[in-house]
Image (cartoon, rainbow, N blue to C red):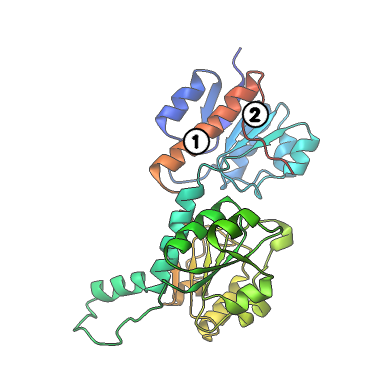
Amino acid sequence: MKRKIYVTRKIPASIYDQLVQHLDVKMWEEEDIPVPREVLLKEIKDVDGLFCTITETIDEKMISHAENLKIISNMAVGFNHIDVKFANKKGIVVTNTPGVLTETTADLTFALLMATARRVVEASNYLRNGEWKSWSPMQLIGKDIYGATIGIIGMGRIGQALARRAKGFGMKILYYNRSRKLEIEKELGAEYCDLDTLLETSDYVSILIPYSPGVKYLIGNKELQRMKKTAILINTARGGIIDEQALYNALKNKEIWAAGLDVFEKEPIDLDSPLLTLPNVVTLPHIGSASEATRIKMAEITADNLIQFLEGGDPLTPVII
């Protein structure tokens, strides 16, 4: 008899077909709407495996409803939406999709940095709104990227990939991390420093650390005031690492120059958020890994973890905490 799994979001047909060859699959069919919590609480009750994404909160209450659950296979690198400790305590394996989205997310991070620095979105809207009447010397001027200093908070896989892109633009690379990365220092000339030095020195600050309660509001009023008034802050990691009210105040009061944000403390962000009123903020709907090839590969790994584990093997990419 096939093991039962529930898939919380509609996935590519090829991945669904792969799953049904091995497992008894039920899937939430709505394309753009996450499965409601009350539905998931019902569906998780008797399944052996769960295929989930960042839009579902798999907390202690949810896990406690799952009488037969053996594996939570997460289609993401980050897992702060899952109570991994409680799952492990219940004998449930949690997996994620590390590595596969590294280059794609680094691409998006550098694209967001460039779009923010050169006011790309603002300039496009300026043209589309009929405001462009003629060329002028100081019209929509932005910040140079080549030769500037970038400070990377979190020198993991994505941080290292971003550093390689920055090196190609002749940027000076500073980084702050729990431990030094001597191989990156040697390869790219990156310089390890404390957080205060990074904030005070960098023209661009990029946040690329995983979320945990210990880094909530790592960037708040005090940290923003340490940054240059000409600096740009980029976050493609997780919302909640930045205090959004403090960021709004810093941007409005011109304590920093601009911000590029792909992630928010609440997602989707409320449309009445004050951040969305500022012209010096570029906002994206959490698309860091959103290339076709990468998202399909993420789904494949998520499916492979389920199939391999539920058929008696070891999971490919277990979360170890």
Residue 100 placement (x, y as % from top left) = 51, 42
First in residue order: circle 1 vs circle 2: 1
Q: Mark 2 points at which residue?
A: 315
Residue 141 placement (x, y as % from top left) = 34, 81
Residue shown at 56%/63% (left/top)? Answer: 189
Out of 266 and 72, give the one closest to the viewer: 72
Out of 63 and 206, give the one closest to the viewer: 206
- Residue 70 placement, left or right of 201: right
Amino acid beneath label 2 = Pro
| Rendered view: 46 above or below 123 | above
Q: Can residue 271 be seen in this view?
A: yes
Residue 20 placement (x, y as % from top left) = 50, 21
Q: Specify the quadrant of the image occupied by residue 176.
A: bottom right
| Rendered view: 157 above or below 246 | above
Q: Specify the quadrant of the image occupied by residue 108.
A: bottom left
Q: Residue furthest front?
A: 186
Could you give the CA–CA distance between mark 1 and mark 2, rounded to whole angstroms? 15 Å
Residue 258 placement (x, y as % from top left) = 48, 76
CB of mark 1 within 8 Å of CB of mark 2? Answer: no
Q: How crowded is mark 1: few (under 14 residues within 10 Å), some or many (20 or more)?
A: many
Q: Residue 299 carries which label?
A: 1
Instruction: For the N terminus, give its image quadrant.
Output: top right
Q: Residue 155 carries which label?
A: none
- Residue 73 placement, left or right of 104: right
Residue shown at 62%/30% (left/top)? Answer: 316
